[in-house]
Image (cartoon, helix red, strand yellow):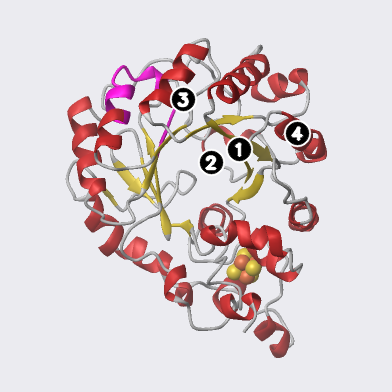
Protein backbone atom coordinates (compact mmCIF):
# COMPACT_ATOMS: atom_id res chain seq x y z
CA UNK A 1 0.00 0.00 0.00
CA UNK A 2 1.38 3.43 -0.85
CA UNK A 3 1.86 6.09 1.80
CA UNK A 4 -0.80 8.21 0.10
CA UNK A 5 -3.43 5.48 0.02
CA UNK A 6 -2.76 4.58 3.62
CA UNK A 7 -3.39 8.03 5.06
CA UNK A 8 -6.33 9.01 2.89
CA UNK A 9 -8.54 5.97 3.48
CA UNK A 10 -12.01 6.55 4.99
CA UNK A 11 -11.28 4.84 8.30
CA UNK A 12 -9.19 7.15 10.45
CA UNK A 13 -5.96 5.39 11.42
CA UNK A 14 -5.31 5.39 15.16
CA UNK A 15 -2.06 7.30 14.87
CA UNK A 16 -3.94 10.30 13.43
CA UNK A 17 -6.33 10.65 16.37
CA UNK A 18 -4.95 12.14 19.56
CA UNK A 19 -7.67 11.15 22.05
CA UNK A 20 -5.47 10.64 25.11
CA UNK A 21 -3.08 13.56 25.02
CA UNK A 22 -2.13 16.59 22.97
CA UNK A 23 1.27 16.56 21.35
CA UNK A 24 1.70 20.31 21.82
CA UNK A 25 0.39 22.59 24.55
CA UNK A 26 0.67 26.32 23.95
CA UNK A 27 0.57 28.17 27.24
CA UNK A 28 0.16 31.94 27.04
CA UNK A 29 2.05 32.58 30.27
CA UNK A 30 1.32 36.33 30.13
CA UNK A 31 -0.18 38.94 27.88
CA UNK A 32 2.36 41.52 28.96
CA UNK A 33 4.66 42.66 26.15
CA UNK A 34 6.61 45.85 25.59
CA UNK A 35 5.88 45.66 21.86
CA UNK A 36 2.49 46.53 20.39
CA UNK A 37 2.48 44.69 17.07
CA UNK A 38 -0.34 45.80 14.83
CA UNK A 39 -1.71 42.30 14.28
CA UNK A 40 -1.07 40.66 17.68
CA UNK A 41 -3.36 37.67 18.31
CA UNK A 42 -3.10 38.15 22.06
CA UNK A 43 -3.85 41.87 21.98
CA UNK A 44 -0.90 42.21 24.33
CA UNK A 45 -0.46 45.22 26.60
CA UNK A 46 2.51 46.68 28.50
CA UNK A 47 1.40 45.42 31.91
CA UNK A 48 0.47 41.91 33.06
CA UNK A 49 -3.17 41.12 33.71
CA UNK A 50 -3.52 40.93 37.51
CA UNK A 51 -5.65 37.83 36.95
CA UNK A 52 -2.98 35.84 35.06
CA UNK A 53 -2.05 32.47 36.51
CA UNK A 54 0.18 32.89 39.58
CA UNK A 55 3.57 31.17 39.90
CA UNK A 56 1.99 28.52 42.13
CA UNK A 57 -0.85 27.94 39.69
CA UNK A 58 1.69 27.69 36.88
CA UNK A 59 3.69 25.01 38.67
CA UNK A 60 0.50 23.09 39.45
CA UNK A 61 -0.57 23.30 35.82
CA UNK A 62 2.72 21.77 34.72
CA UNK A 63 2.25 18.99 37.29
CA UNK A 64 -1.11 18.16 35.72
CA UNK A 65 0.26 18.33 32.17
CA UNK A 66 2.86 15.74 33.11
CA UNK A 67 0.06 13.30 34.05
CA UNK A 68 -1.08 13.03 30.42
CA UNK A 69 1.42 10.20 30.24
CA UNK A 70 3.82 9.10 27.54
CA UNK A 71 4.57 10.55 25.15
CA UNK A 72 4.37 13.65 27.29
CA UNK A 73 3.14 16.81 25.56
CA UNK A 74 5.65 19.41 24.45
CA UNK A 75 4.96 22.77 26.14
CA UNK A 76 5.43 26.03 24.25
CA UNK A 77 5.64 29.07 26.51
CA UNK A 78 4.11 31.90 24.53
CA UNK A 79 2.60 35.29 25.22
CA UNK A 80 2.61 38.30 25.16
CA UNK A 81 6.29 38.06 25.91
CA UNK A 82 7.17 35.11 28.18
CA UNK A 83 10.23 37.06 29.35
CA UNK A 84 7.84 39.47 31.09
CA UNK A 85 7.19 36.71 33.65
CA UNK A 86 9.71 36.85 36.45
CA UNK A 87 9.23 33.15 37.15
CA UNK A 88 9.77 32.03 33.53
CA UNK A 89 12.98 30.12 34.26
CA UNK A 90 11.39 28.51 37.34
CA UNK A 91 8.58 27.28 35.10
CA UNK A 92 11.06 25.99 32.53
CA UNK A 93 13.06 24.19 35.23
CA UNK A 94 9.92 22.61 36.68
CA UNK A 95 8.71 21.47 33.28
CA UNK A 96 12.08 19.92 32.51
CA UNK A 97 12.17 18.18 35.91
CA UNK A 98 8.82 16.59 35.00
CA UNK A 99 10.22 15.30 31.72
CA UNK A 100 8.34 17.79 29.55
CA UNK A 101 9.91 19.16 26.39
CA UNK A 102 9.92 22.95 26.36
CA UNK A 103 10.08 25.66 23.72
CA UNK A 104 9.77 29.41 24.19
CA UNK A 105 8.32 32.04 21.90
CA UNK A 106 9.88 35.31 23.11
CA UNK A 107 9.25 38.77 21.70
CA UNK A 108 12.10 40.62 20.02
CA UNK A 109 12.67 43.18 22.76
CA UNK A 110 15.78 44.42 24.60
CA UNK A 111 15.08 41.69 27.19
CA UNK A 112 16.06 39.04 24.63
CA UNK A 113 19.81 39.34 25.11
CA UNK A 114 22.49 36.82 24.10
CA UNK A 115 22.83 36.00 27.81
CA UNK A 116 19.13 35.12 28.05
CA UNK A 117 19.40 32.98 24.94
CA UNK A 118 22.37 31.12 26.40
CA UNK A 119 20.37 30.65 29.59
CA UNK A 120 17.51 29.10 27.58
CA UNK A 121 19.97 26.61 26.16
CA UNK A 122 21.45 25.78 29.56
CA UNK A 123 17.95 25.39 31.07
CA UNK A 124 17.11 22.68 28.56
CA UNK A 125 14.85 24.69 26.26
CA UNK A 126 14.61 22.75 23.02
CA UNK A 127 13.90 25.65 20.67
CA UNK A 128 12.90 29.27 20.45
CA UNK A 129 10.66 30.76 17.81
CA UNK A 130 11.03 34.24 16.36
CA UNK A 131 8.84 36.09 13.88
CA UNK A 132 10.05 37.34 10.51
CA UNK A 133 7.17 38.52 8.33
CA UNK A 134 8.93 40.52 5.60
CA UNK A 135 12.29 40.18 3.88
CA UNK A 136 13.63 43.67 4.65
CA UNK A 137 13.99 45.32 8.02
CA UNK A 138 12.00 48.37 6.93
CA UNK A 139 9.07 46.30 5.67
CA UNK A 140 9.04 44.01 8.72
CA UNK A 141 9.10 46.91 11.15
CA UNK A 142 6.42 48.76 9.19
CA UNK A 143 4.12 45.72 9.18
CA UNK A 144 4.52 45.21 12.91
CA UNK A 145 4.46 48.92 13.68
CA UNK A 146 7.57 48.49 15.85
CA UNK A 147 10.83 50.19 14.88
CA UNK A 148 13.99 48.12 15.45
CA UNK A 149 12.05 44.85 15.75
CA UNK A 150 13.74 43.27 12.74
CA UNK A 151 17.29 44.08 13.88
CA UNK A 152 16.63 42.59 17.32
CA UNK A 153 15.10 39.49 15.75
CA UNK A 154 18.11 38.90 13.52
CA UNK A 155 20.48 39.44 16.46
CA UNK A 156 18.54 36.93 18.55
CA UNK A 157 18.54 34.39 15.72
CA UNK A 158 22.31 34.69 15.37
CA UNK A 159 22.76 34.39 19.14
CA UNK A 160 20.67 31.19 19.11
CA UNK A 161 22.82 29.77 16.34
CA UNK A 162 25.94 30.73 18.30
CA UNK A 163 24.90 28.65 21.34
CA UNK A 164 23.36 25.79 19.35
CA UNK A 165 19.76 26.53 20.32
CA UNK A 166 17.28 25.32 17.73
CA UNK A 167 15.48 28.14 15.92
CA UNK A 168 12.02 28.19 14.41
CA UNK A 169 11.04 31.19 12.32
CA UNK A 170 7.35 32.07 12.22
CA UNK A 171 6.05 34.01 9.24
CA UNK A 172 2.65 35.54 8.77
CA UNK A 173 0.90 34.80 5.48
CA UNK A 174 -1.47 37.61 4.60
CA UNK A 175 -2.19 39.74 1.55
CA UNK A 176 0.34 42.23 2.90
CA UNK A 177 3.19 39.67 3.10
CA UNK A 178 2.58 36.99 0.48
CA UNK A 179 4.62 38.54 -2.33
CA UNK A 180 7.65 38.71 -0.04
CA UNK A 181 7.82 35.08 1.03
CA UNK A 182 10.59 33.98 -1.33
CA UNK A 183 12.84 36.64 0.20
CA UNK A 184 11.84 35.60 3.71
CA UNK A 185 12.69 31.98 2.84
CA UNK A 186 16.21 32.97 1.75
CA UNK A 187 16.67 34.82 5.02
CA UNK A 188 15.36 31.85 7.03
CA UNK A 189 17.89 29.61 5.26
CA UNK A 190 20.72 32.08 5.84
CA UNK A 191 19.92 32.16 9.56
CA UNK A 192 20.18 28.38 9.75
CA UNK A 193 16.66 27.92 11.11
CA UNK A 194 15.61 24.32 11.67
CA UNK A 195 11.95 25.01 10.98
CA UNK A 196 9.96 27.58 9.02
CA UNK A 197 6.36 27.81 10.18
CA UNK A 198 3.96 29.81 8.06
CA UNK A 199 0.88 31.10 9.82
CA UNK A 200 -2.05 31.63 7.45
CA UNK A 201 -3.88 34.57 8.94
CA UNK A 202 -6.99 33.90 10.95
CA UNK A 203 -8.52 37.23 11.83
CA UNK A 204 -8.63 37.19 15.61
CA UNK A 205 -7.28 39.68 18.13
CA UNK A 206 -5.61 42.58 16.35
CA UNK A 207 -5.22 40.32 13.28
CA UNK A 208 -8.37 41.91 11.85
CA UNK A 209 -6.28 44.87 10.68
CA UNK A 210 -4.74 42.63 7.97
CA UNK A 211 -6.26 40.81 5.01
CA UNK A 212 -6.00 37.04 4.50
CA UNK A 213 -4.92 35.65 1.12
CA UNK A 214 -7.68 34.07 -0.95
CA UNK A 215 -7.96 30.31 -1.48
CA UNK A 216 -6.47 30.31 -4.98
CA UNK A 217 -3.37 32.22 -3.83
CA UNK A 218 -3.06 29.94 -0.81
CA UNK A 219 -3.11 26.89 -3.07
CA UNK A 220 -0.34 28.33 -5.27
CA UNK A 221 1.72 29.14 -2.22
CA UNK A 222 1.29 25.68 -0.70
CA UNK A 223 2.41 24.09 -3.98
CA UNK A 224 5.52 26.29 -3.96
CA UNK A 225 6.24 25.33 -0.36
CA UNK A 226 5.79 21.63 -1.15
CA UNK A 227 8.39 21.87 -3.90
CA UNK A 228 11.07 23.53 -1.77
CA UNK A 229 14.17 21.34 -1.43
CA UNK A 230 14.38 19.11 1.61
CA UNK A 231 18.17 19.22 1.70
CA UNK A 232 20.32 19.02 4.81
CA UNK A 233 20.66 22.53 6.17
CA UNK A 234 17.29 23.63 4.80
CA UNK A 235 14.42 24.25 7.22
CA UNK A 236 11.51 21.89 7.67
CA UNK A 237 8.48 23.77 6.33
CA UNK A 238 5.28 23.59 8.34
CA UNK A 239 2.04 25.53 8.39
CA UNK A 240 -0.22 26.87 11.12
CA UNK A 241 -3.96 27.10 10.42
CA UNK A 242 -3.41 25.66 6.93
CA UNK A 243 -3.34 21.88 7.50
CA UNK A 244 -4.27 21.30 3.87
CA UNK A 245 -0.55 21.71 3.20
CA UNK A 246 -0.45 17.97 4.01
CA UNK A 247 -3.01 17.26 1.29
CA UNK A 248 -0.88 19.26 -1.16
CA UNK A 249 2.25 17.34 -0.13
CA UNK A 250 0.49 14.03 -0.73
CA UNK A 251 -1.03 15.14 -4.03
CA UNK A 252 2.31 16.36 -5.34
CA UNK A 253 4.04 13.25 -4.01
CA UNK A 254 6.69 15.42 -2.39
CA UNK A 255 8.05 12.35 -0.69
CA UNK A 256 11.05 13.85 1.16
CA UNK A 257 8.75 16.57 2.52
CA UNK A 258 6.03 14.02 3.36
CA UNK A 259 8.50 11.89 5.27
CA UNK A 260 9.68 14.92 7.24
CA UNK A 261 6.16 16.23 7.92
CA UNK A 262 4.55 12.89 8.66
CA UNK A 263 4.84 13.23 12.45
CA UNK A 264 2.49 16.22 12.26
CA UNK A 265 -0.18 14.53 10.18
CA UNK A 266 -3.60 14.67 11.84
CA UNK A 267 -2.61 17.39 14.29
CA UNK A 268 -4.92 20.41 14.20
CA UNK A 269 -6.91 22.60 16.58
CA UNK A 270 -8.19 20.31 19.34
CA UNK A 271 -6.63 17.13 17.93
CA UNK A 272 -3.11 17.02 19.30
CA UNK A 273 -3.14 20.76 20.08
CA UNK A 274 -4.35 22.60 23.15
CA UNK A 275 -4.02 26.25 24.22
CA UNK A 276 -4.10 27.63 27.77
CA UNK A 277 -4.75 31.35 28.10
CA UNK A 278 -3.00 33.63 30.59
CA UNK A 279 -6.02 33.31 32.90
CA UNK A 280 -6.28 29.53 32.56
CA UNK A 281 -8.96 29.11 29.91
CA UNK A 282 -8.44 26.05 27.72
CA UNK A 283 -9.12 26.32 23.98
CA UNK A 284 -8.38 24.12 20.97
CA UNK A 285 -5.87 26.70 19.72
CA UNK A 286 -4.80 30.28 20.28
CA UNK A 287 -6.70 31.29 17.16
CA UNK A 288 -9.96 29.63 18.22
CA UNK A 289 -11.11 31.73 21.16
CA UNK A 290 -13.73 29.36 22.56
CA UNK A 291 -13.07 27.92 26.01
CA UNK A 292 -13.85 24.33 26.96
CA UNK A 293 -12.97 24.93 30.62
CA UNK A 294 -10.51 26.59 32.97
CA UNK A 295 -7.57 24.97 34.72
CA UNK A 296 -8.45 26.87 37.90
CA UNK A 297 -11.64 24.86 38.22
CA UNK A 298 -11.10 21.73 36.12
CA UNK A 299 -8.40 19.25 35.35
CA UNK A 300 -6.69 20.00 32.04
CA UNK A 301 -6.56 16.27 31.30
CA UNK A 302 -10.34 15.93 31.70
CA UNK A 303 -10.98 19.01 29.57
CA UNK A 304 -8.87 17.66 26.73
CA UNK A 305 -10.13 14.11 26.85
CA UNK A 306 -13.79 14.56 27.73
CA UNK A 307 -15.16 18.01 26.92
CA UNK A 308 -17.76 17.91 24.11
CA UNK A 309 -15.85 20.63 22.25
CA UNK A 310 -12.58 18.71 22.09
CA UNK A 311 -14.34 15.42 21.38
CA UNK A 312 -16.18 16.86 18.39
CA UNK A 313 -12.99 18.44 17.04
CA UNK A 314 -11.29 15.03 17.07
CA UNK A 315 -14.15 13.41 15.15
CA UNK A 316 -13.66 14.20 11.47
CA UNK A 317 -17.02 12.59 10.70
CA UNK A 318 -18.65 15.51 12.53
CA UNK A 319 -17.15 18.08 10.15
CA UNK A 320 -19.47 19.72 7.68
CA UNK A 321 -19.20 20.64 4.02
CA UNK A 322 -16.20 19.42 2.05
CA UNK A 323 -14.10 18.73 5.15
CA UNK A 324 -16.71 16.20 6.31
CA UNK A 325 -16.46 14.01 3.20
CA UNK A 326 -12.89 14.68 2.15
CA UNK A 327 -10.62 11.69 1.66
CA UNK A 328 -7.82 13.75 3.24
CA UNK A 329 -9.66 14.82 6.38
CA UNK A 330 -7.85 12.43 8.69
CA UNK A 331 -4.46 13.95 7.86
CA UNK A 332 -5.81 17.46 7.36
CA UNK A 333 -9.29 18.29 8.68
CA UNK A 334 -9.03 21.97 7.79
CA UNK A 335 -8.49 24.90 10.11
CA UNK A 336 -11.19 24.75 12.75
CA UNK A 337 -10.24 28.29 13.83
CA UNK A 338 -10.87 29.64 10.31
CA UNK A 339 -14.13 27.69 10.07
CA UNK A 340 -15.30 29.43 13.22
CA UNK A 341 -14.13 32.88 12.13
CA UNK A 342 -15.49 32.60 8.59
CA UNK A 343 -18.62 30.51 9.09
CA UNK A 344 -19.43 30.94 12.78
CA UNK A 345 -19.17 27.14 13.14
CA UNK A 346 -15.95 25.42 14.19
CA UNK A 347 -17.10 22.21 12.45
CA UNK A 348 -17.73 23.91 9.08
CA UNK A 349 -15.46 23.47 6.05
CA UNK A 350 -12.27 25.52 5.83
CA UNK A 351 -12.90 28.15 3.14
CA UNK A 352 -9.18 28.61 2.47
CA UNK A 353 -9.00 25.22 0.72
CA UNK A 354 -9.87 24.82 -2.98
CA UNK A 355 -10.01 21.01 -2.96
CA UNK A 356 -13.10 19.21 -4.27
CA UNK A 357 -13.26 15.84 -2.52
CA UNK A 358 -13.87 12.78 -4.68
CA UNK A 359 -17.32 12.22 -3.14
CA UNK A 360 -18.31 15.78 -3.99
CA UNK A 361 -17.16 15.26 -7.57
CA UNK A 362 -19.19 12.05 -7.77
CA UNK A 363 -22.28 13.94 -6.63
CA UNK A 364 -21.60 16.45 -9.39
CA UNK A 365 -22.11 19.47 -7.22
CA UNK A 366 -21.17 21.25 -4.07
CA UNK A 367 -21.70 19.07 -1.00
S1 LIG B 1 -11.52 19.88 2.00
FE1 LIG B 1 -11.05 20.17 4.20
S2 LIG B 1 -10.15 18.22 4.86
FE2 LIG B 1 -10.08 18.25 2.61
S3 LIG B 1 -8.04 19.02 2.11
FE3 LIG B 1 -9.46 20.78 2.14
S4 LIG B 1 -9.33 21.62 4.22
FE4 LIG B 1 -8.46 19.55 4.25
Q: Which residues are magenta?
A: 76-92
Is 265 rendered above or below residue 74? below
Residue 140 pos. (x, y %) = 71, 24
Single out the mark in the foreground, 4 or 2: 4
**Picture residue at 62% right of the left edge, 74% below the top:** 322
Q: Determine which residue is flagged by label 2.
A: 204
Is 114 rendered above or below residue 91? above
The image quarter containing residue 184 is top right
Residue 279 pos. (x, y %) = 29, 34
Residue 80 forms part of the magenta stretch? yes
The image quarter containing residue 60 is top left
Disc marking residue 44: 3
Q: Determine which residue is flagged by label 4.
A: 184
Marks 2 and 3 close (CB-CB < 8 Å) = no
Q: Residues within 10 Å of mark 1 (few under 14, many from 20)?
A: some
Quarter, ligand 1: bottom right
Disc marking residue 143: none
Q: CA distance from mark 4 to mark 2?
A: 24 Å
Q: CA distance from mark 2 to mark 3?
A: 13 Å
Q: Earlier in the sequence, mark 1 or mark 3?
A: 3
Q: Determine which residue is flagged by label 1.
A: 208
Q: Residues within 10 Å of mark 4 (few under 14, many from 20)?
A: many
Marks 1 and 2 close (CB-CB < 8 Å) = yes
Report helix, strand or loop for mark 4. Answer: helix
Q: CA distance from mark 1 to mark 4?
A: 23 Å
Q: Work out whether residue 49 can be spotted.
A: no
Amino acid sequence: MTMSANVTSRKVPEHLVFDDAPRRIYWEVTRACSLACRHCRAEASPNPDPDELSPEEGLALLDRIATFGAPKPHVIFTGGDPLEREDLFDLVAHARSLGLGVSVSPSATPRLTPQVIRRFREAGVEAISLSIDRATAEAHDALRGVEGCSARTIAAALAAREVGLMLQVNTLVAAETVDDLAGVYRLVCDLGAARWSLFFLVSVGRGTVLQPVDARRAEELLAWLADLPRDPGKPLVTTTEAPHFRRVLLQRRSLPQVAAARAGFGIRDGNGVLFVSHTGYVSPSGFLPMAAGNVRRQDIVDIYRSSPMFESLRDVQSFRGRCGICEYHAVCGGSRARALTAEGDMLAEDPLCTYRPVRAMQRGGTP
